[in-house]
Amino acid sequence: MHRTKVKVATDVLDANATIARANREDFDRAGVRVVNLMSAPGAGKTALLERVLIDGLNGVRAGVLEGDIQGSFDADRLSALHVPVTQLNTGRGFGGECHLDANMVRSALSALSLDEIDLLVIENVGNLVCPAEFRVGEDRRAMISSVTEGEDKPLKYPLMFRTCELVVINKIDLLPHLDFSLERFLENLDQVNPGVEHMLVSARTGEGVAAFARWLEGAARG
Amino acid sequence: MHELSISRAILDTAIGHADGRRVVLVSVTIGALRQVVPESLEFYFQLVSSDTVCDGAPLDWRLEPARLRCACGAEWELDAPAFRCPHCSRGQVTVLTGDQLSVDSIEVEVDDPCTAPR
């Protein structure tokens, strides 16, 4: 017996990347642009989407794919706004995957009315670590960081803050009640993702939300 | 992050290339920017490879440092998440290395032609 070396040279997440590309092809064929929206749990993804959908996107038909470990709470909130919403649960009742991957999104494709929409927003599972690693076939990535999470988040979760093209800073209506330093947060953000586009919003009061709506409209146009 | 499912993915790749032969080494590259803890990966790989052709095969990992290059020409290695150029302060940097997460090669046992059973 002797040993022989076999060259492999394969990316470990190759299987996910392959399915993500297949999703992307399906989205492209239907003429749908896709935004992967990520954040920590409770940062305000659903609240911000609610606000944007209530105020309306100009000339853009939007649909939402809700990713949660379990429950349809978020999908129920959004479906009241008369946009196509599909809930994707990563678990079966008591726990599941902590992120969406390409295969999960692919399994939900048939439930999405792709021919009725121009823009699909995928609201990922609340998690600042794992969703950043798994492409699902999106065109753009955006994240929300709320002021209640503190200034250090970009330094603690550099991959998430780096992988996104837009960082939405939410809950600014709470600033008078917090010791949060926006200046320090922006310095930390700049250190991790120099020059990344960012905006200040309050999903609750609506302040700044129009800018996010315009960004989504831009994403829909490609 | 996800060292268990990543080690399963590594195992599947190794088994796929082993073609039924016994695997005695699996070599991987782990980029510093990839949120993977090598020691955890080693631990889980031993668990998942049990009772497979990779049973007992060590996971040989190479940590690839994060190296960046700036438009000004400067190149440097990162040990903290600070991505602005330390020389000119510009933010247009390219990641040269540190993004990789790959199975590079495996070593398998092969019968010697003279001693192979006839």
Image (cartoon, coloured by chain):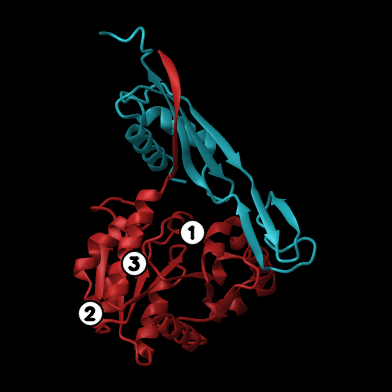
Chain colours: A red, B cyan
Compared with A220, A112 (above or below) is above
Q: Whole-Å distance between the Cαs marked 2 and 1?
A: 31 Å
**Residue for point 59% across, 39% down:** B63
Residues packed near mark 1 inside 10 Å, few (<14), some (14 to 19) or many (20 plus)? many
Q: CA distance from mark 3 to mark 1?
A: 23 Å
**How many numbered discs?**
3
Q: Residue furthest front?
A: B114
Name of the residue lying farthest toward the bottom: A58
Q: CA distance from mark 2 to mark 3?
A: 15 Å
- Under mark 2, the amino acid is Asp
Q: Name which residue lies at 44% across and 23% down.
A: A4
User: Toward which corner of the image does residue B6 lie, by quadrant?
Assistant: top left
- Please identify, in this view, whether the residue under mark 2 or under mark 1 is nearer the observer: 2
Q: Which chain does the numbered disc 1 sit on? A: A
* Residue A87 % position (x, y): 26, 67
Structural crowding at the residue carrying mark 3, measured as other residues with C-alpha within 10 Å and reported as few (<14), some (14–19) or many (≥20): many
| Left or right, residue A137 beside residue A133 | left
Q: Which mark is residue A49?
A: none
Q: Earlier in the sequence, mark 2 or mark 1?
A: 2
Mark before the other along the chain sequence, 2 or 3: 3
Q: Amino acid at mark 3?
A: Arg
Residue linked to disc 1: A128
For the residues bearing labels 3 and 1, Cβ distance under 8 angstroms: no
Q: Identify which residue, A127 or B110, lies in the foreground.
A: B110
Q: Chain of mark 2?
A: A
Look at mark 3 in the image and give the residue it sits on: A24
Q: Which quadrant holds the C terminus of chain A?
A: bottom left
- Residue bearing mark 2: A115
